[in-house]
Image (cartoon, rainbow, N blue to C red):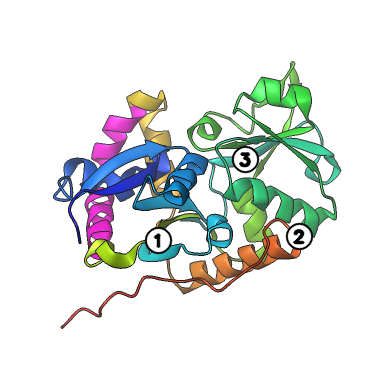
Amino acid sequence: MAANLRVCAVSYLNTAPLVWGMRRGAQQDLFDLSFAVPSVCAERLHSGNADVGLVPVIELARQPDLVVVPGAAVACRGTVRSIVVVSKKPLGEIESFAADTGSRTSVVLVQIVTAHMHGIRPQVRPYPPRLDEMLEIADAALIIGDPALRINPAMATWRGRPVHVYDLGAEWWEMTGLPMVFAVWGMKNLANSDGLAAALAESAAYGMGRIEEIVRAESPRLGLEPEAVREYLTRYVRYELGDREREAMCLYLRLASELGLVETSRGLRFLSVPAMSM
């Protein structure tokens, strides 16, 4: 693997364990690490401004030359807390939703869930993640990442009136019984891929072994209570990319294709990793 590969990681809390080794561990000198919202990570990989990116799963259909680096993902099995729809109406009645401009996978997920569970196709209106303004222009708002963690579903209001809060991880789980995978490591140029999967896995293992260190660093930065950060990273977000996650990704992309949200749903391509000797 070439040194200083340009890696674009998602700038949200859920990415912290995956990149902790790149930030503070033995992988610090291997990568040129930058952060951005999911949509920008996808653009950097598409334009060649990044060699490796933590990309929204929907990009596997939109960028057909992407190859998934196996080993880790940002996923959930049920409630995820950081991908929510805040709505003035019940989910099955919304006619429009304002979609966080940083989102790609989740904006498609809303459309899949509303179509298959409620038989509706709401209008999508891209908008910056400013909840009050989003609910001014649409029936509902899709909020992702760290801003979503600041929303208390039991106390959420708009103009003094209670609103509905739907967790999209939970909605997908109810619909399919499968995990929801939001992002994976992806790359295009395989020339410098030797050792990459191992280095990314080692960075993640370093982070998962230092959750308390991450909590201490990220809690004040985000203005969240330490217990909320700890619970989110250990209870709600999952980082496995196993057989069930692969099945879920294939289903998600197939449903997106059937709704015409991507042109085609091709088979997933994974980076070939040599077996470890025992």
Closest to the observer: 232 or 58? 58
Q: Kindly identify which numbered label has been placed on residue 84.
A: 3
Residue 210 can be seen in this image: no
Q: Residue at x 21, y 65 (%)?
A: 195
Q: Position of residue 106 (x, y in %)?
A: 61, 47
Indicate the amino acid at tag 2: Leu
Of circles 3 and 2, which is in front?
2
Q: Quadrant of the C terminus?
A: bottom left
Q: Which residues are magenta?
A: 198-219
Of circles 3 and 1, which is in front?
1
| Residue 204 among those drawn in magenta | yes
**Element carrying mark 2:** loop
Q: Residue at x 18, y 41 (%)?
A: 24
Q: Position of residue 241 (x, y in %)?
A: 42, 65
Indicate the amino acid at tag 3: Val
Q: Quadrant of the N terminus?
A: bottom left
Instruction: Write down the residue under mark 2.
Output: 259
Please state if 134 lies on the left or on the right of 206 as rendered: right
Instruction: Write down the residue under mark 1.
Output: 188
Q: Position of residue 63 (x, y in %)?
A: 53, 58
